[in-house]
Amino acid sequence: MQTSGLTTTISPTDIGQGDGVYISTYGCQMNENDSERMMTLLEMMNFRPVTSPDQASIIIINSCSIREKPVHKVHSEVGRYRKMKALNPKLKIGVAGCVASQEKDKLKRDIPLIDFVIGTDAIDKLPEVIAKVRQGEGIISARFEHSQPYHIETMVRNPGVSTFVNITKGCDNFCTFCVVPFTRGRERSRPFKHLIDDVNKLVDRGVREVTLLGQNVNSYTSDCGVNFAQLLKRLARETGISRIRYTTSHPKDFTDELIGVMAENQDKIMEYIHLPVQSGNSEVLARMNRGYTREEYVAKAQAIFKAMPNAVLSTDLITGFPGETDAQFEDTMSLLEEVPYENIFAFNYSPRPMTKAAKFTDQVPDLVKSARLTRVLDRHREIAFDLVKKYDGQVLKVLVEKAVDDGRIQGRSTQNKSVYITGDAALIGQIVDVRINESRPLTLKGDLLQ
């Protein structure tokens, strides 16, 4: 297997010869966006997307290493393609994403069926990688380009009504539980002007809503000095986009300036905020290297609600972090009562390679972690059903995204709720008024107001 220092020269456009490409995607919205980018680049080479791996001559597993046993998932999926590869010698299998960045040469050594490995920083080199792989070379391209500016153009084949726009990549926070700095590299921000141009081009293609993506979006800093709050303000005022969302934000970087910009531009910037807390105990937060206390987090949540009483918060929680005592876990349970989260994403702690927490000696037993997770999920389910009762009878602004079934359409409210409505597909792309008649934590149902 050759470890290649590839250039960014684009291969001839007929390399694909109409052959099929299948990409399986695991993990976060960043990975979904990366898969979209890879498929766009491959279509430019005359490959075509297929819906089943047995129709493909290129299979790419876009992997995620955030949760437990990610390498095992890669092993398992590649194993399912063994017979296909035996029947089709032209078939090439690659691994992309965070596991590719993390494991590099080890992947090929342990899984000989893999033909190429491409890290998160090398996606734009995919055309050259594929060109070489089709010529019989094995390629590993997983080196981080820390010194290079983050210059990309948003590539979306069929953006539809709503799409993602990367604004940063990588992370400099080094939370002790998180592998992202090792799989996506150090933090870099895209130039402000590039983002304005990107969003304007998407608007010209019919996009009504963008979600700004990054491991830590609110640490965005352009080369011209524009920070994240200023980026939001100028996107709202200098582009034709109708709606702006973003994820994920870090509490330590959630400034009063950002709260003020959101409050002043609620016609464009949606009131839904994902603000990961991870734990409700300050001592655990310190061991996680989160950079804030419980009290500081709660104060920021209160400042958000004071400026925007209609704000909607969601969060991430980890149960059973190393050393977490019963009393410290109870602080997480009490936080659910103190901060009105309409949605949470809660997980057991799982050790990740290269992270500090994986080396902590006071790991919490799996049964304890699972019991704590069950308590968190059960209590939040009760809280969430109570919180969403407020939507019953309300009229919400809904951006219609797609037709579903039986004469229904589906869209998203400004609060990031999926809303199902009886209506015509001709409304796709429009923002309509909907009176809600049934409310659940993640989905609402309502009637279109004429």
Image: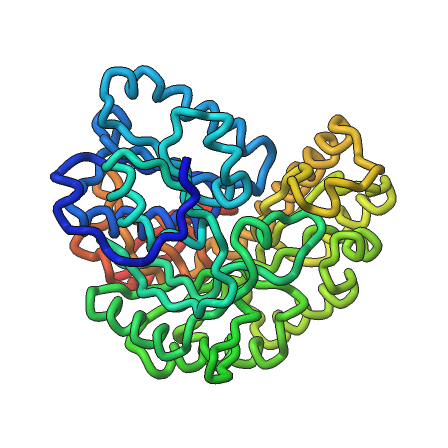
Q: Quadrant of the C terminus?
A: bottom left
Q: Where is residue 214 in the image (x, y as percent from the top left)?
A: 49, 61
Q: Residue at x 46, y 39 (%)?
A: 63
Q: Position of residue 51 (x, y in %)?
A: 25, 32
Q: In this view, does 225 lie above or below 403?
A: below
The colouring scheme, among rainbow, by chain, secondary structure or one colour, is rainbow
Q: Residue at x 81, y 45 (%)?
A: 330
Q: Where is residue 326 in the image (x, y as percent from the top left)?
A: 85, 40
Quarter location, residue 3? top left
* Residue 18 shown left or right of residue 147 in the figure: left
Observer-nearest of 384 and 300? 300
Residue 425 appearing in the image? yes
Q: Position of residue 286 (x, y in %)?
A: 80, 57
Quarter location, residue 360? top right
Q: Quadrant of the N terminus?
A: top left
Q: Which residue is drawn at 57% across and 45% down?
A: 385
Q: Is residue 230 above or below residue 329?
A: below
* Residue 157 shown left or right of residue 109 in the figure: left
Observer-nearest of 41 and 407? 41
